[in-house]
Image (cartoon, grey):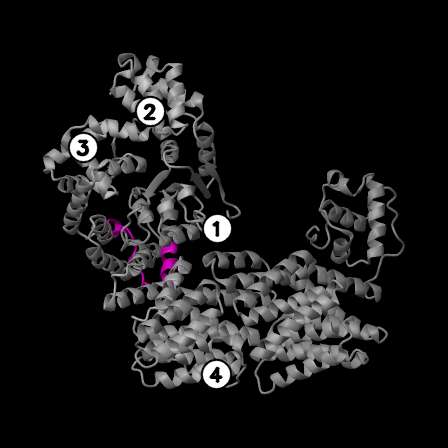
């Protein structure tokens, strides 16, 4: 076969045509790492060829290019495509790896001598995923300039997708990530990395969507391959048959070259034009199969049946050929371009479409025998590929055997914690009516076990619900299924109905499986939305049940839950019990529960106002978590530290640190809500009210939807205060009322700091004095006997607000609250209380207002609350505490400093209302300033941005709108 001198590309095949723009786009992104490039296109469109062309260029620039492939019949080997790519790295210039890379040693045994010792593996799935992400990231960082390519993501397993998603959000600085996929083969409504992926800021990249070649490009392809034989008529016929799909055009060109070209075979063009297959592939492949030797045809059929790349000896065994004949047949197929070398020593048909054509061309009886021989040959391999054996057993028509093999494959997948591979198998098994008795129970329990942490939980849930109606399953089995279903519902989207399933599971499990029943009771004890009586009752049941169990770790889990609930209620006895938690037990599972208890108490202590104690406990929890391998506790400890930074006024770089926290666990609703609450607080303090509203609304939604009571109350307090600042008293009262109902129902008054004072102020603004008084009294009763300094300080603010006819008395309460806030270590809250004290004294004639306002101004300035500081400074100026220079400078036709601020805000698109909020001016004053700015600039409102490029130099400009 002669394809002409101009045909060869880097893979020895056809000239690269019609993709120069896409190649430039791909190279431009990868030369500016970090970068994520998605290459999308149908089968045969040229995705792999584009990537190979780019790889050849990048390797010449001394960048490593590591490629991994996703397969339709994958074995239960989590992260296989990424691991396959990593093992191909050239480590000659790598001087060493960070300790975190040691987690890859078990997955890369050939490189174990170059990697650090593997660390202790966490027991929870999220912890293992985080540990592996850190290992992959540090490994790739050590390689220097590199590109990681993962092909065929439409076949990706959930674990690998999750890993790539997290990696894409935080790429090493010198890494490019290229992902290829077929959009039409993604799950319904699916995205290549899941719906939660968004292109991260600071990362280059794009989506390259490959379309068909144009007719001139197909003609160029033909001319390069066939030379003078490629007439215009032939090019047109090739284009019509291929419809611009490169794979089909190339298959036809191979056929024509083998036949000596159209001039050597006068009927070739006519046959090409008249072929009835729309893409021409079936005829091209089957035609070439007919020209093969019997041995080569047998190997081609064997490859089609196996469905995945296979080594030469396996192909020969299944085909029934000896090793020597098999090797000669493989060489013949490679020369005929029917077979390709997919990996080192493994071969597959050139394309999935060719595999389908060959497979369908095999007569039924012959196909069954090949599947049977595949089962026999695969059983002899090490490790045994159980997934492939199960597939071939079913394809051979042995349904009973398939059920056994599928269970073995599922068990293997679960053993290596690859639930994403096990779940589809288990679902298919449970759909078979012949699966009955103990085997059905076993499969049902296996699915229930993996469902709670499944990324495809909704599909699993449909099967689990059907199983609950199966009268053939024992009660204990249904109870365990119900528990898995309920916990999955809670993990998936905090669906409150999950608690209903968990509660029903208790009755099913109590007699036969008491340990699982206790696990369910502990989950129910944390259903805070039902109120303390409900949670206390379930906790007491769990404590009664666990006494009879020989399970110290479960007892520790129950005790940790008790401490968590005590903290939520501000119980003063909490601290002594916390001190007595075991710090050095022999059982690591018990120590893990100690870390959990310490972190839960620390998190709640920050709500209560024990900020210094919260910092110490959270740090200790993080240290213990590092010892026992509990990344989730380490993550939560980090989050508590950032919340304490926000409360202490350590605001520099805080939003960026919170973004990084969320990127660690993007699905953690609590972290996203925390970022939103803090973001809302900072935006409001800086005069960006629209942004603040967006943040607080997001946090309030997450808190309400996911039953995060503390978050809901904090977000509601922020929203209420913001609506009040905007003069929207009815909205403020509506938000506050909903949150107060939550605090009342859950007895969360010890954690309602900020909400009570905001709600009282909203009630007063709506002329609901009696409601305000009742609320303050109720909150005071709820705090009776509680150790909750923050709520006590907030209650004192509320009491000051109620003394609006007694300015001196009100100021006394506000100053008392400021002392409390300073004692806790929250300067921003202290400043707000001091400003209230100053405003109260102003209402009494001004005497005594300067001192608290001056202190407030200093604290606002210290933490960076620019809008608050501006407002406070204006009041001090009006009181004469800050002297104006005598006289007023005239600016003539130039803009005054205030007019510059207004012009900058107008250029940013701000409305008069937003300008008034940002600069603390009355609407009428803003109207006057705007009129002067427009007159001096000689333009209208829409033209300001074109003639005034500077931005405002005062408080941060608000969001437009």
Label 4: element kind: helix
Q: Is residue 123 magenta?
A: yes
User: Which residue corresponds to mark 2?
Assistant: 275
The span from disc 2 to disc 4 (Cα, nearest Å) is 77 Å
Mark in the foreground, 2 or 4: 2
User: Badge 3, how many Cα within 10 Å: few under 14, some, many 20+?
Assistant: many
Whether label 3 touches label 4, CB < 8 Å: no
Q: Answer above or below: position of 865 versus 518.
A: above
Kindly identify the residue that appears in the image at 82 percent across and 45 percent down: 933
Residue 171 in the magenta stretch? The answer is: no
Distance CA(mark 1)–CA(mark 2)? 44 Å
Q: Front-most of 616 and 407?
A: 407
User: How many numbered marks appear?
Assistant: 4
In the picture of the structure, the residue carrying the numbered disc 4 is: 536
Q: Is residue 899 left or right of residue 684?
A: right
**Mark with earlier residue (3, 4):** 3
Residue at point 45%, 78% (across, down): 525
Q: Nearer the viewer, mark 1 or mark 2?
A: 2
Please tell me whether residue 308 is drawn above or below residue 708 in the rendered image. Answer: above
Residue 820: x, y in percent?
65, 78
Q: Quadrant of the N terminus?
A: top left
- Reading the image, the residue beneath label 3 is 297
Q: Is residue 752 visible?
A: no
Quadrant in the rendering for residue 521: bottom left
Q: Are marks 3 and 1 in contact (CB under 8 Å)?
A: no
At label 2, counting other C-alpha atoms closer than 10 Å, the crowd grade (few under 14, some 14-19, many 20 or more) is: some
């Amino acid at each position: 076969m002669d394809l002409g001198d101009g045909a060869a590309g880097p893979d020895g095949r056809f000239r690269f045509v019609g993709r120069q723009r896409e190649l430039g786009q791909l190279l431009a992104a990868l030369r500016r790492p970090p970068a994520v490039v998605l290459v999308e296109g149908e089968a045969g469109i040229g995705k792999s060829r584009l990537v190979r062309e780019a790889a050849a260029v990048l390797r010449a620039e001394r960048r490593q290019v590591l490629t991994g492939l996703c397969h339709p019949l994958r074995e239960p080997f989590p992260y296989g495509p990424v691991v396959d790519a990593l093992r191909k790295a050239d480590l000659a210039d790598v001087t060493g790896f960070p300790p975190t890379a040691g987690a890859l040693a078990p997955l890369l045994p050939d490189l174990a001598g170059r990697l650090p010792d593997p660390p202790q593996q966490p027991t929870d799935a999220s912890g293992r995923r985080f540990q592996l992400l850190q290992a992959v990231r540090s490994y790739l960082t050590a390689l220097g300039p590199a590109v990681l390519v993962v092909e065929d993501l439409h076949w990706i397993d959930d674990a690998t997708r999750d890993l790539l998603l997290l990696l894409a959000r935080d790429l090493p600085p010198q890494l490019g990530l290229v992902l290829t996929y077929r959009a039409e083969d993604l799950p319904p409504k699916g995205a290549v990395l899941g719906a939660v992926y968004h292109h991260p800021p600071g990362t280059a990249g794009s989506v390259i969507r490959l379309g068909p070649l144009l007719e001139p490009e197909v003609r160029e392809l033909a001319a390069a391959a066939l030379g003078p034989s490629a007439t215009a008529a032939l090019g047109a016929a090739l284009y019509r048959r291929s419809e611009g799909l490169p794979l089909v055009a190339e298959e036809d060109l191979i056929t024509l070259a083998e036949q000596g070209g159209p001039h050597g075979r006068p009927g070739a063009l006519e046959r090409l034009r008249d072929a009835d297959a729309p893409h021409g592939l079936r005829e091209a492949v089957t035609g070439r199969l007919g020209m093969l030797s019997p041995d080569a045809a047998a190997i081609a059929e064997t490859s089609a049946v196996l469905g995945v790349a296979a080594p030469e000896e396996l192909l020969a065994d299944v085909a029934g050929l000896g090793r020597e004949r098999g090797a000669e047949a493989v060489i013949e197929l490679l020369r005929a371009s029917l077979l390709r070398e997919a990996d080192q020593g493994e071969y597959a048909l050139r394309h999935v479409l060719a595999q389908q054509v060959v497979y369908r061309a095999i007569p039924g009886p012959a196909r069954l025998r090949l599947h049977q021989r595949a089962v026999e040959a695969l059983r002899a391999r090490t490790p045994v590929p159980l997934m492939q054996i199960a597939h071939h057993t079913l394809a051979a028509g042995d349904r009973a055997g398939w059920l056994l093999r599928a269970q073995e494959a599922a068990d293997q997948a679960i053993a290596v914690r690859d639930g994403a591979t096990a779940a589809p198998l288990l679902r298919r098994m449970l759909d078979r009516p012949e699966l009955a008795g103990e085997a059905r129970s076993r499969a049902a329990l296996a699915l229930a076990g993996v469902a709670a942490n499944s990324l495809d939980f909704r599909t699993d849930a449909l099967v689990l619900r059907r199983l609950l109606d199966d009268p053939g399953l024992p009660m204990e089995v249904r109870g365990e299924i119900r528990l898995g279903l309920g916990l999955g519902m809670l993990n998936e989207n905090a669906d409150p109905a999950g608690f209903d399933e968990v509660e029903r599971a208790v009755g099913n499990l109590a007699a036969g499986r008491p340990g699982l029943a206790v696990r369910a009771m502990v989950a129910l004890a944390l259903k805070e939305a039902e109120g303390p009586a409900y949670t206390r009752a379930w906790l007491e049941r769990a404590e009664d049940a666990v006494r009879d169990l020989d399970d110290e770790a479960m007892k520790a889990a129950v005790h940790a839950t008790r401490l968590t609930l005590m903290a939520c209620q501000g119980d003063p006895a909490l601290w002594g019990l916390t001190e007595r938690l075991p710090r050095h037990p022999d059982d690591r599972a018990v120590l893990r529960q100690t870390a959990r208890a310490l972190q839960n108490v620390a998190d709640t202590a920050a709500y209560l106002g024990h900020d210094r104690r919260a910092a110490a406990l959270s740090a200790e929890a993080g240290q213990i978590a590092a010892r026992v391998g509990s990344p989730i506790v380490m993550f939560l400890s980090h989050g508590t530290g950032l919340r304490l930074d926000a409360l202490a006024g350590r605001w520099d770089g805080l939003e960026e640190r919170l973004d990084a926290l969320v990127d660690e666990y993007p699905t953690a609703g609590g972290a996203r809500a925390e970022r939103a609450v803090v973001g809302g607080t900072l935006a409001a303090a800086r005069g960006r009210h629209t942004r603040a509203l967006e943040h607080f609304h997001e946090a309030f939604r997450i808190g309400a939807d996911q039953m995060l009571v503390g978050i809901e109350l904090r977000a509601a307090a922020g929203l209420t205060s913001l609506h009040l600042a905007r003069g929207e008293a009815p909205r403020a009262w509506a938000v506050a009322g909903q949150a107060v109902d939550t605090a009342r129902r859950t007895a969360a008054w010890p954690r309602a700091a900020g909400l009570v004072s905001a709600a009282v102020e909203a009630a007063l603004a709506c002329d609901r004095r009696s409601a305000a008084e009742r609320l303050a009294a109720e909150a005071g009763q709820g705090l009776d006997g509680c150790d909750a300094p923050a709520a006590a300080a907030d209650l004192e603010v509320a009491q000051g607000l109620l003394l609006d006819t007694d300015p001196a008395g009100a100021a006394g309460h506000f100053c008392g609250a400021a002392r409390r806030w300073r004692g806790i270590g929250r300067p921003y809250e202290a400043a707000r209380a001091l400003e209230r004290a100053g405003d109260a004294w102003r209402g009494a004639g001004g005497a005594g207002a300067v001192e608290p306002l001056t202190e407030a101004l200093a604290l606002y300035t210290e933490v960076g609350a620019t809008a608050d500081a501006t407002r406070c400074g204006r009041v001090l100026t009006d009181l004469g505490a800050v002297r104006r220079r005598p006289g007023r400078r005239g600016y003539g036709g130039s803009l005054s400093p205030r007019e510059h601020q207004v012009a900058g805000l107008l250029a940013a698109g701000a409305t008069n209302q937003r300008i008034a909020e940002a600069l603390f001016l009355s609407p009428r004053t803003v109207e006057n300033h705007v009129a002067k700015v427009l007159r001096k600039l000689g333009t209208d409102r829409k033209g300001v941005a074109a003639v005034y490029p500077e931005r405002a130099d005062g408080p941060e400009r608000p969001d437009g709108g």
